[in-house]
């Protein structure tokens, strides 16, 4: 199986400013509002790649455990999936289903600044939402221009709405562009975008005093998620991509999360592995690759050290749990196995 590596990744560097100013924040909100209104009017041009048959095949790119929303403001984004290619044009939206490998190449519409590539990317899990405005930082490659992330009560509904919209995709990429399923999908995407706008500008009702985490920390979280499949992912690599020293980045992560950065990467790999073991039919070798392990032997040892059981035992236990309690909803996150504590 081909390793999930971007040959340009090690050469990337970013400016020290990880969050844009007021102009970028306003552009982000105006773009979200325009797509939300288009969905409310039933005019949203929405692409829904097929969620079937394309979990984590070999190839270049990355995937997420939840659905991801792309809103194209200007220029175009060319997506490569394991079994298809799709182009997202200005004014179009796309929901990429969970666990679908995809790679992106971008281009502007012309040399004028207003013709430059711009899109918005939204991702939500059970507790937090991230939303960023992207630009073309290197020829053909997107990067974050402005990023905002929040813990918020709207996170879980947004995750659920995007997952439901993704499931309405047709048997072929880009299908289901009309009829009641598309009406449903537009409404769900519109609700998700409106939820993101609430998250950005309303305090979390469950914790009104909570403040947004540092933009650099949000960026690190996103970089880790996008590169968990790379066995070469390291603290040094992340620091280079963030334009700071490894010591500074490690100190920032430890101060705000209580975890060492290397431990955070390892934990996220283990959580991804546990989810894939429970929710997919991928082989142990494929899951090892998808979680950034060069080989299955080291993956098995790390999983057993972290959770106190082998991947095979965890998958068997998860299957028994599903059989005992009925099939879980696709939006339900199965509880993670409890990490083994030191004696």
Image: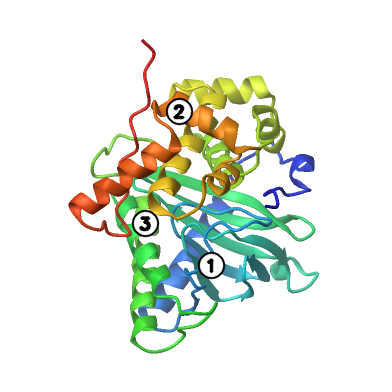
Marks 3 and 1, the one that precedes in the sequence: 1
Nearest to the eye among marks 3 and 2: give it.
2
- Among all residues in the image, which is located at the extreme top? 343
SS label for mark 2:
helix
Q: Is residue 343 left or right of residue 55?
A: left
Residue 154 point in image, percent of width and height? 30, 53
> Disc number at residue 89?
none
Give the residue at mark 3. 159
Q: Is residue 275 left or right of residue 75?
A: left
SS label for mark 3:
helix
Q: CA distance from mark 3 to mark 2?
A: 30 Å
Give the residue at mark 1. 71
Q: Residue at x 73, y 69 (%)?
A: 108
290 or 76: nearer the viewer = 290
> Disc number at residue 304?
2
Q: Is residue 240 visible?
A: yes
* Vertical position of residue 208 compared to residue 60: above or below: above
Residue 212 point in image, percent of width and height? 42, 38
Dot 1 surroundings within 10 Å: few (below 14), some, or many (20 or more)?
Answer: many
Say which quarter of the image contains residue 82. bottom right
């Amino acid at each position: 199986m081909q390793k999930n590596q971007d040959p340009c990744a090690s050469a990337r560097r970013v400016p020290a400013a990880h969050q844009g100013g007021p102009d970028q924040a306003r552009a982000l909100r105006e773009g979200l509002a325009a797509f939300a209104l288009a969905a409310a009017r039933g005019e949203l041009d929405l692409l829904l790649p097929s969620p079937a048959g394309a979990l984590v095949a070999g190839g270049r790119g990355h995937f997420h455990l939840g659905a991801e929303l792309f809103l194209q403001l200007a220029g175009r984004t060319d997506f490569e999936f394991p079994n298809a290619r799709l182009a997202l044009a200005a004014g179009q939206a796309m929901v990429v289903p969970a666990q679908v490998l995809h790679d992106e190449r971008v281009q502007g519409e012309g040399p004028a600044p207003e013709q430059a590539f711009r899109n918005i990317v939204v991702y939500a899990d059970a507790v937090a939402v991230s939303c960023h405005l992207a630009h073309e930082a290197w020829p053909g490659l997107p990067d974050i221009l402005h990023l905002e992330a929040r813990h918020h009560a709207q996170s879980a509904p947004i995750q659920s709405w995007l997952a439901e919209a993704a499931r309405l995709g047709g048997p072929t990429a880009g299908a289901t562009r009309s009829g009641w399923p598309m009406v449903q999908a537009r409404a769900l995407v519109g609700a998700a975008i409106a939820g993101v706008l609430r998250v950005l500008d309303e305090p979390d009702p469950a914790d009104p005093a909570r403040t947004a985490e540092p933009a650099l920390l949000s960026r690190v979280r996103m970089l880790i998620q996008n590169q968990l499949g790379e066995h070469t992912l390291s603290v040094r690599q992340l620091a280079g991509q963030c334009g700071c020293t490894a010591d500074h980045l490690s100190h920032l992560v430890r101060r705000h999360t209580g975890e060492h950065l290397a431990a955070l990467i390892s934990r996220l790999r283990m959580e991804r592995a546990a989810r894939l073991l429970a929710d997919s039919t991928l082989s142990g070798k494929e899951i090892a690759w998808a979680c950034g392990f060069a080989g299955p032997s080291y993956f098995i040892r790390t999983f057993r050290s972290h959770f106190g059981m082998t991947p095979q035992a965890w998958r068997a236990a998860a299957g028994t749990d599903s059989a005992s309690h009925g099939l879980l909803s696709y939006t339900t996150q199965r509880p993670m196995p409890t990490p083994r504590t030191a004696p």
